Amino acid sequence: MKNNLTLGIMQPYFFPYLGHFSLIAAVDEWVVFDITQYTPKTWMNRNRVLHPNSGWQYVTVPLSNSSISIKTSEAKVLNLSDAKANVVGKLSHYKNKAPYFDVVNALVHDVFDKATDDSLVHLNVRSLSAVCRYLGIPFNYRICSELNLPLPEKLPPGEWALEISSMLGANRYINPAGGQDIFDPAKFIARGIALDFAQAGELVYNTAPYQYEPYLSILDVLMWNSPTVVADAVCNGVEMIKKTT
């Protein structure tokens, strides 16, 4: 039995870019995909913000067990206090320049300070939840490793979403537009699941005295824009694309 349910399924990213939140806003439920091999040096434990001199720099959460031999659900933060200090330190140059520094800085502190364990997945889910609350966007999520779904150990990249959507009774699945090539629409149609792709637009904003850099972490977007402006871009700046072949 299919429910009137639209799913989004993505790996847990650390304060991801604005388009990630456009996808969250477009679905009914979000599945945190944490059951496959962890990949070091990805958006799961780092993202990009403005550099105080020019260009951008990484904000990174070091892990104690970063390795392709673990599953994402097993990734552990090396030291939460040190990670917070590193992130907050690299955001400090926004002070007295970005109009929303104080509230965004407090949001970052809150995400780290509410940690009850060293799970990277839990840290990243808190970051998504905190941003969505700030923007007034519903965030109904489930963590895949906690669902105990009877999924095969190995599946082609384009079939994880199909199997999870089918097992959870979804009738629609939305993926970022950049991943279209790995999906076979016919397989989704055969399961009674609509397959769509979300193409998020770019929000260009004033970052004076710095030069604007596109597609940085949502932290940079929030530093310079009111929550109303960002929420509008998240909810209305996305185009749905349907792949037919």
Image (tube, rainbow, N blue to C red):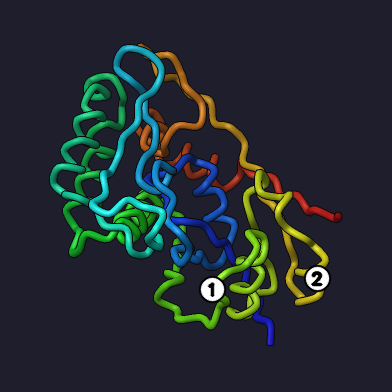
* Residue 44 x/y as whole percent: 40, 48
Quarter in which the C terminus is drawn: bottom right
Q: Is residue 7 above or below residue 85?
A: below
Quarter-wise, where is residue 119 in the image? bottom left
Front-lying residue, 18 or 151: 151
Q: Is residue 86 above or below residue 141?
A: above
What amino acid is at disc 2?
A: Ile
Residue type, label 1: Glu
Farthest right residue in view: 245
For residue 78, side relative to residue 152 (left or right):
left
Give the residue at x 20% y 50%. Answer: 78
The residue positioned 47% from the left and 40% from the top of the image is 17
Q: Which mark is residue 134?
A: none
Tell me which corner region of the image, top left, top right, bottom left or bottom right, holds residue 9. bottom right
Question: Answer yes or no: do the residues labelled 1 and 2 have beta carbons within 8 Å?
Answer: no
Q: Quadrant of the N terminus?
A: bottom right
Q: CA distance from mark 1 to mark 2?
A: 24 Å
Front residue (pair 202, 90)? 90
Q: Which residue is mark 2?
A: 189
Q: Assign a secondary structure to mark 1.
A: loop
Label for residue 153? 1
Q: Residues within 10 Å of mark 2 (few under 14, many from 20)?
A: few
Q: Quadrant of residue 115?
A: bottom left
Mark 1 vs mark 2, foreground winner is 1
Residue 134 percent location from the top left of the image: 36, 49
Query: Residue at coordinates 66% horizontally, 66% vertically from top-left?
Result: 159
Residue found at x 62% / y 66%: 161
